Image: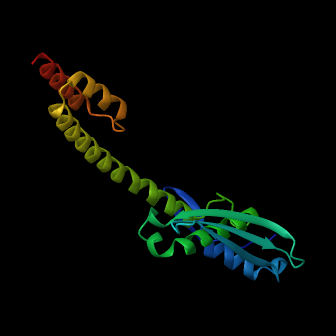
Amino acid sequence: MSDYKFKTTNIRGKKYVEVSERIKFFRQEERFKNWTISSEITMSDDRKEVICKTIIADTEQRVISTGHAHEERASSNINKTSFVENCETSAIGRALAMLGIGIDVSIASANEVKDAIAKQDAKPAVKKQTTEESTESDYQKAITFLKNSSDPVDAWSKISKQSKTKFSDEQYDRLQSFVAEKSKS
């Protein structure tokens, strides 16, 4: 067993090994001499997603370990131009981890953890903003539909069934009040 000291990256208090460190170790270790790392890329028909399978084979081309990864082109700024490369790097890191390289703390590499954190941090802000905008837009459409309707109760029933967005409590109360007022007239 080697006494190789992997350089690690500290992410939120945990140490992770980068894929480049795993590759460097693999390439310099005598026991892995003439072993191969090969990747198979599968692209979605719309070229927006990629899946990569990496295989590590011994000198007789027996598969010793594999690693898989998935990336979406739209998931981050770097993926807009390099999602295939990021996917392959992740798959290689996972295949090397399955071989037992650099897994003292985690199978996930520093690269994967950084990407996952970036995606988690980015999604809530976008989702919240989109939901609020969508809710307001749906609310305005509902008001317009109710104003133009001859039967506000029937119109409200249709809105309730078709709306994919939940209105805020305040919007819901205002819509119900509007329906009640319009029904009286």
Asked whether, in this view, residue 100 is left or right of residue 140, the answer is right
Q: Is residue 45 visible?
A: yes
Q: Is residue 145 above or below residue 86?
A: above
**Identity of the residue drawn at 83% across and 69% down:** 63
**Residue farthest to the front?**
150
Front-most of 155 and 41?
A: 155
Q: Is residue 42 above or below residue 129?
A: below
Asked whether, in this view, residue 64 is left or right of residue 174, the answer is right
**Identity of the residue drawn at 87% across and 79% down:** 59
**Residue farthest to the right?**
60
Residue 81 x, y percent position in the rendering: 46, 76
Residue 108 x, y percent position in the rendering: 62, 60
Residue 134 found in image quarter: top left
Q: Is residue 50 above or below residue 135?
A: below
Residue 84 x, y percent position in the rendering: 56, 73
How does the figure colour the protein chain or chains?
Answer: rainbow
Front-most of 46 and 134?
A: 46
Q: Is residue 18 visible?
A: no
Front-most of 14 and 93?
A: 93
**Identity of the residue drawn at 50% across and 63% down:** 115
Count of numbered badges drawn on the protein: 0
**Residue farthest to the top?**
184
Q: Quadrant for the N terminus, please.
A: bottom right
Asked whether, in this view, residue 157 is left or right of residue 109, the answer is left
Q: Quadrant for the C terminus, please.
A: top left
**Identity of the residue drawn at 74% across and 62% down:** 98
Residue 76 found in image quarter: bottom left
